[in-house]
Each structure stands twice: as structure tokens, then as C-alpha cells.
Image (spheres, grey):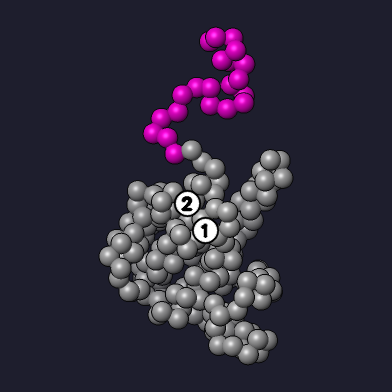
């Protein structure tokens, strides 16, 4: 269990650094609005409004390596690419252009190293190898930031579909909590206070 907690802690600590390198930073109201719209689009089976099908496939593949599906659901089950599509279409033409440029550079590397046209066509090992080389770029940092924002947003607004983000971090979704709240309150219950 300790190893799992350290891994989770390391994961969230790495997010701090990526948010600083991201070309997009969202406020809570912006995240909520994007989640609501992305959920509506996903449920309606709509096409992407900002991303092309190719871009959506590529961004989805990158996001799926950031929070992959394992024994727990990942970004694909959470519908994160719809969240990205919505955020990038919200008067963020300059940031979208930077991401498209980063994607073009990634696709160039894919073609040079593996002789295929698209990142999403590579196997996971090849994808991880390429992403490791661009881990400190604004392109990757922005996609990581958007991935996490879409994965752990409030479910009632369209992010975190089916509570998959909560499952990943083992958060119990309760409307109210009763004391004691954690190990630090254990003696409180024992004393009968």
C-alpha cells in the first residue's frame, strides 16, 4: 500500500511542474463549463467541433499514455478527448496553434523513427519512448494538464465520466462525511467524544 501511495503522490507532484509549463491554465468555472459541454457532445455522439478526427485520435493516444487503462479505467473511459476539444475551441486559437505545431513535430518523429504517419498507430512501448523525449515541452505539458483536468473534474459537469477519476485515486464519493475523518481523529472516537 505504501508503494501505491508514493506513486500517487509522485504523480500529483509531477502535475505541479506541468501546469507551470502548460500554455493553457484553466479556472474552475472554465473547467466546469468545458466539462458540461463535453459531456453533452459525447452523449449526443457529436463530432469534434475544434479538433479534426486525426488530431483527436492523436491527442487521445497521448492522453491514454498519461493515464492509461489498466486494472482501473483511464482517460478513454472518462471521455477526456471531448473535454480537450471543448477547451481548445473556447477562444484559444493561439494555444491550439501551438499544440498543432507540437503535434506536427511529434508526427515527424514518428515518421522518421517508425515509418508510420500517426502516433496513435504505434504500440505503447514506442509511444512511451517518444513521449519520454518530449516530456518537458509545452506541447506535452499542456496535454498532460488538460488530461488531468478532464479526468478529475466534477462528474456532474461532464468530466470524470462514470466517476473513473475518483476510482483511480480511490476517492469515496459521498454527499456527507461523518467524523472521525481520518487517522488523526481515531483517538477522538476511542475517547467517545
Which residue range is magenta in the image?
A: 173-193
Please give the label number shown on residue 164: 2
Please give the label number shown on residue 17: none
Front residue of 142 and 161: 161
Mark 1 closeness class: few <14, some 14–19, many ≥20 residues within 10 Å: many
Q: Secondary structure at mark 2?
A: helix
Mark 2 closeness class: few <14, some 14–19, many ≥20 residues within 10 Å: many
Question: Where in the figure is residue 163, as x and y percent of width and height?
Answer: 44, 49
137 with respect to 167 (left or right): right
29 with respect to 101 (left or right): left
Front residue of 187 and 77: 77
> Can you name the residue that lies furthest to the right here?
3
Q: Residue at x 63, y 53 (%)?
A: 11
Q: Is 33 placed above or below 111 here?
A: above
Is disc 1 in contact with disc 2, using a CB cutoff of under 8 Å?
A: yes
Determine if the magenta segment contains residue 47.
Answer: no
Which SS does the magenta portion mostly show?
A: loop
Determine if the magenta segment contains residue 188.
Answer: yes
Front residue of 47 and 103: 47
Please give the label number shown on residue 74: 1
Question: Where in the figure is residue 65, as x and y percent of width and height?
Answer: 59, 66
Q: Specify whether residue 175 is in view.
A: yes
Question: Where in the figure is residue 164, as x and y percent of width and height?
Answer: 47, 51
> Can you name the residue that lies furthest to the top here?
192
Q: CA distance from mark 1 to mark 2?
A: 7 Å
Question: Where in the figure is residue 101, as x and y percent of width and height?
Answer: 53, 82
Q: Residue at x 62, y 16 (%)?
A: 187
Amino acid at each position: 500500500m505504501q508503494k501505491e501511495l508514493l506513486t500517487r503522490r509522485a504523480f500529483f507532484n509531477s502535475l505541479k511542474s506541468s501546469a507551470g509549463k502548460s500554455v493553457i491554465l484553466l479556472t474552475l468555472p472554465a473547467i466546469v463549463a468545458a466539462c458540461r459541454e463535453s459531456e453533452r457532445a459525447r452523449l449526443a455522439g457529436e463530432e469534434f467541433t475544434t479538433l479534426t478526427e486525426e488530431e483527436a485520435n492523436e491527442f487521445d493516444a497521448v492522453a491514454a499514455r498519461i493515464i492509461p487503462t489498466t486494472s482501473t479505467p483511464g482517460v478513454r473511459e472518462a471521455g477526456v478527448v471531448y473535454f480537450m476539444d471543448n477547451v481548445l475551441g473556447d477562444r484559444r486559437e493561439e494555444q491550439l496553434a501551438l499544440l498543432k505545431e507540437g503535434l506536427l513535430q511529434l508526427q515527424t518523429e514518428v515518421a522518421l523513427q517508425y515509418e508510420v504517419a500517426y502516433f496513435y498507430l504505434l504500440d505503447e512501448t514506442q509511444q512511451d519512448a517518444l513521449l519520454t523525449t518530449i516530456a518537458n515541452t509545452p506541447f506535452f505539458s499542456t496535454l498532460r494538464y488538460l488530461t488531468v483536468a478532464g479526468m478529475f473534474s466534477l462528474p456532474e459537469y461532464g468530466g470524470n465520466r462514470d466517476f473513473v477519476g475518483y476510482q483511480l485515486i480511490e476517492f469515496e464519493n459521498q454527499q456527507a462525511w461523518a467524523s472521525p475523518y481520518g487517522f488523526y481523529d481515531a483517538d477522538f472516537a476511542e475517547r467517545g467524544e
